[in-house]
Amino acid sequence: MTAAAAMPCTLFISDLHLDPERPAITALFLDLLATRGRYADALYILGDLFEAWIGDDDDSELNQAVCRELSGCADSGTTVFVMHGNRDFLLGKRFAQQAHCVMLDDPARIDLYGTPTLLMHGDLLCTDDTEYQAFRTLARSAAWQEELLAKTLAERRAIAEEMRRVSREKTGGKPESIMDVNPAAVIGHMTGHGVTRLIHGHTHRPAVHDLVIEGKAAQRIVLGDWYEQGSMLECTPAGCELQVLNARQAS
């Protein structure tokens, strides 16, 4: 263990969108779990770990490998938290048991080395996209999920592919501003939960935004996606740093 690894740290990632068609990204993530992930106090995955999750009964090679390495990381002493995203909202109890992880509510308030911090996937903040918010409400309902999970795996795969196709078409036709966070929603969630720091993903726009809320300095940290490379936030008692990961840097 290096001196840097010995310092208490917590890692945050989101929007990996793991998919069999991008094996290099899966390998990068699995390497992270086997190396730096095992030295952390906790690892938080804030949504969209998978490009699509059609049910805990889908035992594909990718899903099995990810669950196996997540459980290995957790068994090493790192607490692994997983939040639902807009692509993997069907992650359930069986997944959590197999991966030895803790499912996290969205939003979730934590104490991060003395700083009250709000964790979100981020889609709840995009309130200007009313069409998406309506679908999100539907897709998170127990009745809708129960009906979907009653279908065969083959049927669910076809539905997931069609949903991705429709999503790509609709996203391509929407202004960029609609798909970003609403500033009032950000302030509302932060003040409502009494925090000065917000960490989220979803928008794929990694950045650190300094804010002033009710006269107090505040911060919104946005995690990046893993389509071309890895994106991770490392927080220690000294502060937080956004990092870019590639295959050579993972270990």
Image: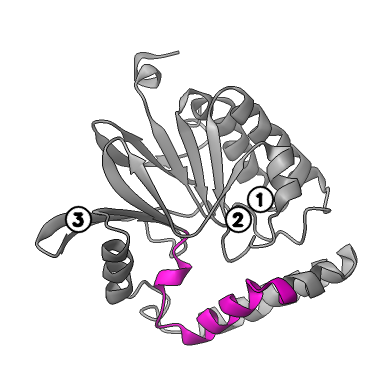
Residue drawn at point x = 47 percent, y = 34 percent: 42
Q: Residues within 10 Å of mark 2 (few under 14, many from 20)?
A: many
Q: Position of residue 68 (x, y in %)?
A: 72, 34
Q: Earlier in the sequence, mark 3 or mark 2?
A: 2
The residue nearer to you, when weighing 11 against 137, is 137
- Judging by the rendered image, the residue that carries numbered circle 1 is 22
Which of label 3 and label 1 is nearer to you?
3
Would residue 131 be counted in the magenta stretch?
A: yes
Q: Quadrant of residue 169?
A: bottom right
The residue furthest left is 215
The secondary structure making up most of the magenta span is helix
Would residue 199 be counted in the magenta stretch?
A: no
**Residue 110 vertical position relative to residue 213 in the rendered view, above or below:** above
Name the kind of residue labelled 3 in the image.
Answer: Ala
Q: Secondary structure at mark 3?
A: strand
Residue 93 in view in this figure: yes
Give the Cα separation between the discs numbered 3 and 1. 36 Å
Residue drawn at point x = 29 percent, y = 70 percent: 188
Residue drawn at point x = 63 percent, y = 79 percent: 138
Q: Are marks 1 and 2 in contact (CB under 8 Å)?
A: yes
Q: Quadrant of residue 238?
A: top left
Range covered by the magenta-colored residues: 121-144
**Residue 135 vertical position relative to residue 152 in the rendered view, above or below:** below
**Residue 160 vertical position relative to residue 37 in the rendered view, above or below:** below
- Judging by the rendered image, the residue that carries numbered circle 3 is 218
Q: Position of residue 26 (x, y in %)?
A: 64, 43
- Judging by the rendered image, the residue that carries numbered circle 2 is 17
